Image: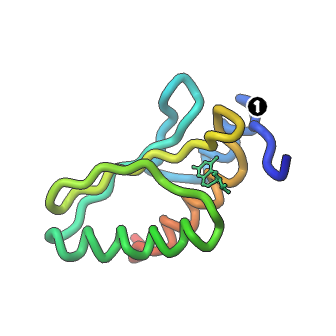
Amino acid sequence: MKYEKLDPAAIDTMLAERRGWELGRDGAAISRSFRFRDFSEAFAFMTRCALLAEKIDHHPEWFNVYNRVDIILSTHAVSGLSALDFKMAEAIDRLLPAD
Ligand SMILES: C[C@H](O)[C@H](O)[C@H]1CNC2=NC(N)=NC(=O)C2=N1
């Protein structure tokens, strides 16, 4: 398998570098909630996420209502977290303006 399931120590280390993301589903997923000015900005962000997802073949679970986008990342193939989730989280964070 290309990406292996990360152990809890590795997850802790990688999560520490991803401000705003938190662990969920008993350590099998990471999630973050994003707010935008309006629906148009939220959907533009989702479009960019979708292009990233296709590029690295790793797809988010998400929920959108108006200006809010909740994203959950998990690797179904390993029933947990892999490096790919953190790669995707980092790429998503890079879509946002620096704070
Ligand atoms: C066939 C295809 O490569 C796989 O189904 C990919 C697609 N996108 C995926 N996305 C996520 N989040 N987890 C996966 O295991 C996964 N697998």
Q: Is mark 1 within 8 Å of ligand 1?
A: no
Residue 21 versus residue 24 in the image, above or below = below
* Mark 1 residue type: Asp
Q: Position of residue 17 (x, y in %)?
A: 61, 52
Residue drawn at (47%, 39%), measured in percent from left and top? 22
92 or 60, which lies in front?
Answer: 60
Residue drawn at (54%, 72%), measured in percent from left and top? 52
Q: Is residue 31 left or right of residue 16?
A: left
Judged from the image, the secondary structure of the residue bearing numbered disc 1 is loop
Residue 54 versus residue 14 in the image, above or below = below
Residue 98 picture quarter: bottom left
Quadrant placement of the C terminus: bottom left
Residue 50 picture quarter: bottom left
Determine crowd level at label 1: few under 14, some 14-19, many 20+ residues with C-alpha closer than 10 A: few
Q: Position of residue 64 (x, y in %)?
A: 25, 54
Residue 67 picture quarter: bottom left
Residue drawn at (25%, 68%), measured in percent from left and top? 42
**Residue at mark 1:** 7
Residue 71 versus residue 80 in the image, above or below = below
Q: Residue furthest top?
A: 26
Q: Is residue 53 left or right of residue 9?
A: left
